[in-house]
Amino acid sequence: MTAAPAVRVDELPWPGLDVSGLRILVTGFGVSGYAVADQTMQRGARVTVVDGARSERNLERARILEVLGVDVRLGPEHTSALPETADGAPFDLVVTSPGWRLDQPLLLAAADAGIPVWSEVELARRMQAPDGPAWLGVTGTNGKTTVVTMLETILRTAGLRAVACGNVGLPVIEAALDPEGFDVLAVELSSFQLHRTEHVACEAAVILGITEDHLDWHGGIDAYAADKGRIYADCEIACVYSVADERTRRLVEDADVLEGCRAIGVTLGAPGLSELGVVDGILVDRAFLDDRAHRALELAHLEDLAHLGPHGAPPHVVFDALAAAALARAHGVDPLHVREGLRAFRAGAHRAEVVARAGGVAWVDDSKATNPDAAAASLASTDSVVWIVGGLTKGADVDGLVASAAARLRGAVVIGADGTPFLEALARHAADVPVRRIEPGHTDGSTLSAREVMEQAVAAAAALAEDGDAVLMAPAAASMDQFEDYAERGDLFAAAARAIAGEGAA
């Protein structure tokens, strides 16, 4: 085994960082933690993994890696303080899960000991070879997954070997070190991931917008925005921002980028110079052409996106398409391939996905809308809607959301262990709208199963819906009060909707 280097890991040369001989502590054994342990172990690192949960999944992963020489320690006793290495030498590096809080004792101890604490993304960027894939980065409070998957579709339509990775699907480190080699990565990054990432170095990156979210973790909106802004660091070609969001513009202005990198705006209106926007139902580019002062390139028509909503493409989906197009154009993708990619794109599961159609009613699963802003965007895509809403609000204010949605509500069905915030807001702002409450328990005190909750909600919505309506599940809340996660909530909605609409209806 190669001896550990005499210099700190953050002083070792990169890209192409050599981790052989390094003592690496991986905190958190989720998807990214497992990937870090696997990729660094394969390259000669001495890896220790700690995680507080002795779940069956973690135990199974541990059995696999322990055979290969990884030291896996599961249980809360291993996460409360900085552990020792097997040979008693200090760790060279800590790579932490994005879910671990800033005040986690082990991480504080590592920082006090002078040990670098990196995200999986930072490690991936440093380990990637100098001739590795270009990164096109996406962050923002809402819309990240839609944009990276749209971008992936566009890039593949253009004949490039591309993959969406990061906060969606494949871990960044696996994509960056893929032995066959990708041409380009569409990288979704959360604020948690970006907090401990110093070097993103995207070819182009976008911040879709910033609204209040995860403020308990970051400590406030300014700190949250600053972490989002890290995605622009060392950007090479384009920093893409929302023209309507002044905060994203300021983050571009404050970004430390490479010489020649341009600010590119995205708007739902007519684009100005160095912007992408919409003119007479056509998505156009006034940024990535030589004569942008006098003309624009046609990219796509709104009709090319009509399949992405119950009543055509909603505004937030059009914005997402423009953001994905901007990143693709920054990478040199031809306008024809942008249009073909947008036509071919289909929304991912639980993201404003039309799961059934029958009797003039569209059933839409947007279980991923776990906060009021995401639900507001989803509601804006409908003309007349029966809204299934409720769950863990985590203290979020839903009053403004309900007030803005009231005019388009045909009816509302409230789920969740505590429906009070939504019931009170509906009573204030939509008093004439019929509301059905799915009580969380029976009269004998026993609780409804997750399936029963959703079957009752869907039946209640079906009774309220009329020809031309959408039944939209955009809960504006987290799911864990009644469901395992938002995916289970969405799956149960889709199953119940298809049963109501008729087997196979879509």
Image (cartoon, rainbow, N blue to C red):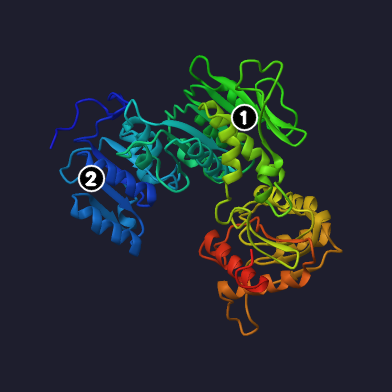
Residue name at image x 62 percent, y 40 percent: 320
Is residue 210 visible from the viewing direction of this image? no
Amino acid type at circle 1 is Tyr
Which residue carries the number 1 mark?
241
SS at badge 2: loop
Q: Where is residue 426 in the image (x, y as percent from the top left)?
A: 79, 60
Residue name at image x 74 percent, y 68 percent: 359
> In the figure, is residue 469 to the left or right of 335?
right
> In the figure, is residue 204 to the left or right of 115?
right
> In the figure, is residue 403 to the left or right of 324?
right
Query: Residue lying furthest bottom in this view?
Result: 444
Q: Position of residue 297 (x, y in %)?
A: 66, 26
**Front-most of 220 and 252?**
252
Return the mark for residue 84. 2
**Front-most of 81 and 18?**
18
The answer to whether residue 291 is above or below residue 199 is above
At label 2, counting other C-alpha atoms closer than 10 Å, the crowd grade (few under 14, some 14-19, many 20 or more) is few
Q: Position of residue 288 (x, y in %)?
A: 60, 22
